Every structure is written in structure tokens, then in C-alpha cells.
Amino acid sequence: MSDPEVWLRGPVRDVPPHLQPVAHSLLQCREELERLLAGVPSERIWRTNANAASIGFHVLHAAGSLDRLFTYARGEMLSEAQRQVLAQESQPDTRRTADDLLTAFDAAVERALDQLRDTAENTLTAAREVGRARAPSTVLGLLFHAAEHAQRHVGQAVTTNRLMGATSTRLVDREISMLQQSPMYSYLPAKDVARARAFYEQKLGFRPLEETGGGVVYEFGKGTACFLYPTPNAGTNRASQAFWRVADVEREVAELTSRGVTFEEYDMPGMKTVNGILTAGGAKTAWFTDTEGNILAIVQDVRG
């Protein structure tokens, strides 16, 4: 059995209560990167596809942005060395191995945890300025944004690896385990099943296959399905819960928008959506969130 997520293991030592979610998020990111980089072939780390940034970029940028945002949270401006790191992040450095990347991210997390431990809770609403434009923020806002930003790029690294792996495995003739030949189904947690059903059945237009265990099963193409089930833990996963592979993501976004679904917009280095759609990693992806806090996506393969 796998370990529970970091936030379920209790408070992080000496971190103030209001900043525990930041510490939990960063430690979760570190564990996910450890799992990712342990299994990524070295030649894949710096590979790019179409307009997609590499796994290496996402890891370096997650570490670098964490360092920069925590610098702003201290009320300081970036040093020249930090600006040089920022300028170099988008340049592939094939000399850096998976261990090098993990070491850099681990060091950034440890520095961040030390700063969280030293942050007095009575300073959390203190005003701070970001960048040369001196955009207004607060200590608390910057710390939470830093954690969220790291999560996004770690998620992008995982997704990029998955998409590249799908391409690679098609080229390898190897025995497939019995488990991999079996259908795989997803779970969708819900605090309020009736509310969630209204979203899926009225806004998304799903038809239930059967009601069971207090929840409901929805069936999809090629024999796939998901189980919407009741649990008080719904909405605690801040990574994508599931995705649908579609033929035309723009058409699906337009259709779902007309039904009242709101798609997320992101604008950050290496991840910028246009009309709710990100083109990266040989795919077009659009994310939305259901009534229970589950992050879902629709993905179109555009590798040709």
C-alpha cells in the first residue's frame, strides 16, 4: 500500500499552522518528482515536442520560481544571480542528469521550509511587491502562490513524461502484463453526490450506467468508466483527477462552455493557455473543475 499524501501525515515540524498547507504542498511535489525522475530515461529529460517545454525545464523552473517567490516574500528584490538563473532556465542543459535536477529541487524545498519556519504569523498580511513592475501582493499570497506554481510545473513534468512515454512504448516490442491488458477505471470523489450528479448529468450531459454504493457509475468510450462516490475527502487532490482523449478539443471546449462549464486559464512561464487551451507536449489540453473540487481535463493528441 502506498503512503498517504503528505498532508495526511500530520503537521510539518516547526512550521506555523497557517503555513502548513504550503509545506505539505512542497513536500508532496518533492515526492512526486522523486518518483518521476527515478523512472525517466535520461534521453527524455531534455526532449521537447512541438511547443512543449521539456521535463528538465519544468523541474528547473519549479525550483527557480520557488526561490524567487520566496525572495519576494522576504521583502527583497531578485539578485543578479537569480536573474541569470531565470534567463537560463529555458535553455536545455543536457549535462544535468535526473539526480542533478532532483538535488536542485530538493535544495529549493529545504530553503523554503527553513523560511516558512522563520516566518512569524503576524507578518502574513504584510504588503510585498513582485518584479520590476512592483505588482502588489502579501507574504501569505506569495508563499501560497509559490507552492501552487511548483505544483503546476511538477504536474506538467509528469504529464509531459506520460505523453512522451506513450509515444516511446509504441515503438517497443515487449510483453504486456495481464494487468495492463485489463480495463482501467477512475474514481471521482464527491462530498455531495447529488450536487455532483447535477453537474455531470446536466452540464456535461452524462447518462448514468448504474447506481451503487451510494454513488453512480458513468460509462465512456472503448469500455472505460468512472465511479462517482461519496467521501469527505473530495477536493483535496490539487492535481488532475482524470482526462478524456478527444478528437477536437476546441469543439469540446465550445460545447461545454455553452453548457456553463468554466475552463481554467493559466499564464506562467512554460504554461500559457489561449481561450482555455494549452498547446504543449504534442497535445492540446483544457482543464475544468467540477462542483467537488476535482480537476479534470480534455486532451487532443496533435502529434500527427
Image: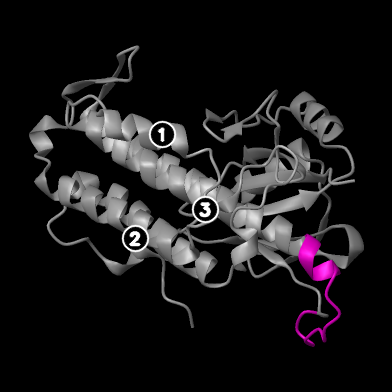
For label 3, the crowd category at 10 Å Cα-Cα, with few meaning under 14, some 14 to 19 and many 20 or more, is some
Specify the amino acid type for callout 1: Leu
Q: Which residue is mark 3?
A: 191
Specify the amino acid type for callout 2: Trp
Q: Using the image, tell me which numbered label, if any, was put on residue 188.
A: none
Judge by depth and name the residue closer to the eye, 64 or 146: 64
Mark count: 3
Residue 13 position within the rendered picture, expressed as x and y whole percent measured from the top left: 16, 62
Residue 216 position within the rendered picture, expressed as x and y whole percent measured from the top left: 71, 61
Q: Could you say whether the residue bearing mark 3 is in a helix, strand or loop? A: loop
Q: Is residue 230 above or below residue 125?
A: below
Tell whether 30 sits left or right of 114.
right
Lower sequence index among marks 3 and 1: 1
- Kindly report the distance in space between the C-alpha atoms of the residues bearing marks 2 and 3: 19 Å
Q: Which residue is mark 2?
A: 7
Specify the amino acid type for callout 3: Lys
Report the residue that reaches farthest toward the front. Answer: 95
From which residue to which does the magenta span run? 167-180
Q: How is the image coloured?
A: one colour
Lower sequence index among marks 2 and 3: 2
